[in-house]
Image: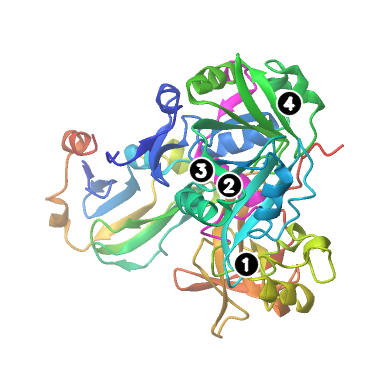
Amino acid sequence: MRKFTDEHEWLDCTGEVATVGITTHAAEQLGDLVFIELPKVGAKLTKGEAAAVVESVKAASDVYAPVSGEVIAVNEVAVTDPSSVGTDPQGAGWLYRIRLDDPASLDGLMDEAAYAEFAK
Amino acid sequence: MSPDVACTPLHALHLRHGGRMVPFAGYAMPVQYPAGLLKEHLHTRAEAGLFDVSHMGQIRLTPRSGDVDDVARALETLLPIDVLGLKPGRQRYGLLLDASGGIRDDLMVAHCGDSLVLVVNAANKVADEAYLRAHLADACTVTVLARALVALQGPGAEAALTRLAPEVAAMRFMDVRMLGLLGASAIVTRSGYTGEDGFEISIPEDKAEALAEALLADPAVLPIGLGARDSLRLEAGLCLHGNDIDPGTDPVEAGLSWAIPRVRRRGGVRAGGFPGAARILSALEDGPSRKRVGLRPEGPTPVRAGAPLFADETGTAVGQVTSGGFGPSLQAPIAMGYLPAALAAPGTRVFAEVRGKRLAVAVAALPFVPAGFKRA
């Protein structure tokens, strides 16, 4: 089940693990990405803190943790080829996987239709 | 876009070409087009890019006496450059200094035969106009030109503009020509802000769109936004007023001493006589205590404006980054900033702080990318 945040991130949740990335809308707004910094595997993230950084030629943007939990994997391809996040942000360009402290923390997030309306 | 943001004469064209408009210096300007910043940047270096720079100020100084030398003499009281030596049909870089030698603005001066035409930064144009009126009213009339300004930059610029005006092929770097373009009177200079060969074309506002579309009809020419304009000028080592130079920096520490010729220095026939002269003339002889430098981060992390610079991994800040980002032609992060003179030699390793981490950066010679000007 894919969920979306008002910070333009998406989460795919399977059990207590979620894959996190930025939305297509966010990637379009950022423009060509040239640098990506991801959290370390094992890092404990608190909802709302800066978890990753995506940088275009012009600017650096924080990607905030949409939920609290522990990082269990990161997408190394995104780091070595930042453009892959720009071209397929909601697929191959995922950023990291997190084990949720509380699976119920996804409950307030938007579904795809609600996000599409929000991002208009 | 907020209602107090002005539009340039090319606003409709930007929208038609898919420009993403952002407010900049009081104008709605395209930050990029659908091609995207990286492609726009690389296309300009490989072929040709068209930039709307109509937000910049164009100011004509017309001598009351009819003798342009009288305006040149008056302007030399505000600029440390050789204006009197500027020949008709030539253009020169200049700096407006304040009483302490700080840089109020940087500009281009073109000798148009019967007058001088200045191009000044958008953010400073209202202040510059008032300042010029206050100091030059006896010598000249000061007229803000209601004209569009477009820049055509890149190795393909000459071929593209030659189709509309064959005579531009004979122009060299920093030449100025008044010529007919699409039935309008244009002021064309062979200069720009990208480090590439190219032209800046001043044209009546009602002809701007026709000119831009005529140039864009050439498949070699793409519209380029402000984003690539900034990355191109950074690779070219060119200063952005408000970032790399401002009233808190002087021309000597900014590495712009080349703009101050011998004739305006101590021992020259028109030595001094500009704002801040005592301080600037001493600094020219003694050398600056800090210098603007190029910076190449050793890792992949971009280092951006405002990042503090350190001599080592533990000490206090010794300088600051003033412009920084990613250089598309270099496929690497690049920056400029100020460092103490003792740390300013190319190859010196210093550290920049980004998100709390000190990253190694090497002082690098400017420009990062060699200039492609047509000098001969």
Magenta range is B216-244
| Residue A104 occupies quadrant | bottom left
Residue A51 or residue B244, whichever sits in front? B244
2 or 4: tag closer to the N-terminus: 4
Amino acid type for the residue under numbered disc 4: Glu
Residue at 51% x, 36% y is B225
Up/down of B56 relative to B159, above or below? below
**Quick one: label 4, few (<14), some, or many (20+) residues within 10 Å?**
many
Spatial CA distance of label 1 from label 4 is 38 Å
* Residue reaching furthest to the bottom: B315
- The chain letter under disc 2 is B
Residue that numbered label 2 is attached to = B231
Tell me the element at label 4.
helix
Residue that numbered label 1 is attached to = B275
Spatial CA distance of label 1 from label 2 is 32 Å
Residue at 64% x, 43% y is B193
Residue that numbered label 3 is attached to = B227
Amino acid type for the residue under numbered disc 1: Pro
Point out which mark residue A57 bears.
Answer: none
Amino acid type for the residue under numbered disc 3: Gly
- The chain letter under disc 1 is B
On whether disc 2 and disc 4 are found on a single subunit, the reply is yes
Q: Are marks 2 and 3 in contact (CB under 8 Å)?
A: yes
1 or 2: tag closer to the N-terminus: 2
In the displayed structure image, the side of residue A66 where residue B44 appears, left or right: right
Spatial CA distance of label 2 from label 3 is 7 Å
4 or 3: tag closer to the N-terminus: 4
In the displayed structure image, the side of residue B34 where residue B175 appears, left or right: right
